[in-house]
Amino acid sequence: MSVSNYQYHAREEVPLKEQWVKWQNPCQVRYGNDGSGAHFADYVLPALNETDVFPIVKRPVTRSDFANVANDCRSLFQAKDDLKNANFHEHLMALNPNEGLRLATAELIIQGFQNGGDILRMANNIVRLKQAENVVKYSAYYKQMEKYLSVYTLSLDNFIAEPAKSFNNFLDFLFEGMNVSQKRKEKVAFKYEEYFYKKSAESPHVTWGKSSNRLEQNNYLRNDPIYGPPLRKIEFLVDAALDETREKNTNIGANLTAR
């Protein structure tokens, strides 16, 4: 996600829908045009410091992690003499690849006011949805009402590799227990796959970041003392959510076979 984001935006021609890279401050951590509003961390870090939702992952992102990324962001953005008045996009083009990757990743972590913060929003959503699922699961009220909540987490990499299979698995989950034939779901899944490939040919956005140096840049982030620890723990969190979804798909498949 971080590498794809950097490689997609660090190029001369900025797509029309991505013009925000020319005016956004990647290091702004507060809401409001003047940066005087609520702190983005106050919205996402409480959930990410929970310890009872996914026991395998303890406190994925702390305030110290957040502060370290923000400090690194400020050390890179408009800090060099020749970039004092440069915008975010110009920094991505001018900085060396490792510095550019760090700046782009910082924006994905701490910039919650505008287009950034996606990594922490994603992690926050995983935790909050799991909490909601547990509340419904253990609630006597919802049991009496015969209501339940089940969360489905989809891997974008898996979806890109096998769109029809991924979408069909989602349809199995969505229509579990309902009278929808497997043949009909497969037809819809293959139709969606055709649509996906057509859109991919028109725009490389969904597959950008598969370049030859992707592994090298991934390893750089994993081993970076500031970005590595929180990103690795968030990866564990995502994997835990994906494992739960895979287990749901396995159970659904077994039920379909038994019918």
Image (spheres, rainbow, N blue to C red):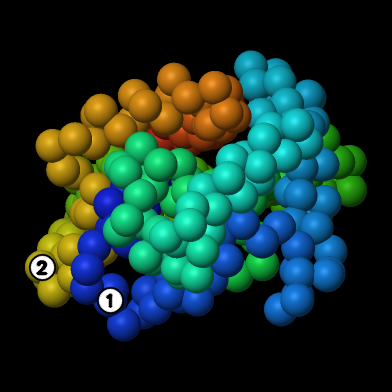
Direction from residue 189 to residue 153 in the image, left or right = right
Residue on which disc 1 sits: 15
> Looking at the rendering, in which quadrant would you find the N terminus?
top left
Direction from residue 44 to residue 186 in the image, left or right = left
Callout count: 2
Vertical order, 223 against 125 (above or below): above
Category of crowding for the residue at label 1, using alpha-carbon neighbours closer than 10 angstroms: few (below 14), some (14–19), many (at least 20): few
Determine the secondary structure under disc 2: helix
> Looking at the rendering, in which quadrant would you find the C terminus?
top left
Q: Could you tell me if residue 122 is visible in this image?
A: no
Q: Nearer the viewer, residue 207 or 168?
A: 207
Direction from residue 250 to residue 144 in the image, left or right = right
Residue at the location (78% across, 24% down)? 51
Q: Nearer the viewer, residue 11 or 205?
A: 11
Report, in whole angstroms, how far the alpha carbon at label 1 lies from the one at label 2. Answer: 15 Å
Q: Earlier in the sequence, mark 1 or mark 2?
A: 1
Residue 58 picture location, percent across and down:
71, 21
Image quadrant where residue 175 sits: bottom left
Direction from residue 100 to residue 230 in the image, left or right = right
Disc 2 residue type (three-letter): Ala
In this view, the residue farthest toward the top is 56
Category of crowding for the residue at label 2, using alpha-carbon neighbours closer than 10 angstroms: few (below 14), some (14–19), many (at least 20): few
Q: Nearer the viewer, residue 143 or 44?
A: 44
Q: Which mark is residue 201?
A: 2
Disc 1 residue type (three-letter): Pro
Residue at the location (28% across, 74% down)? 14
In this view, the residue farthest toward the front is 81
Q: Of the residues tagged 1 and 2, which is closer to the observer?
A: 1
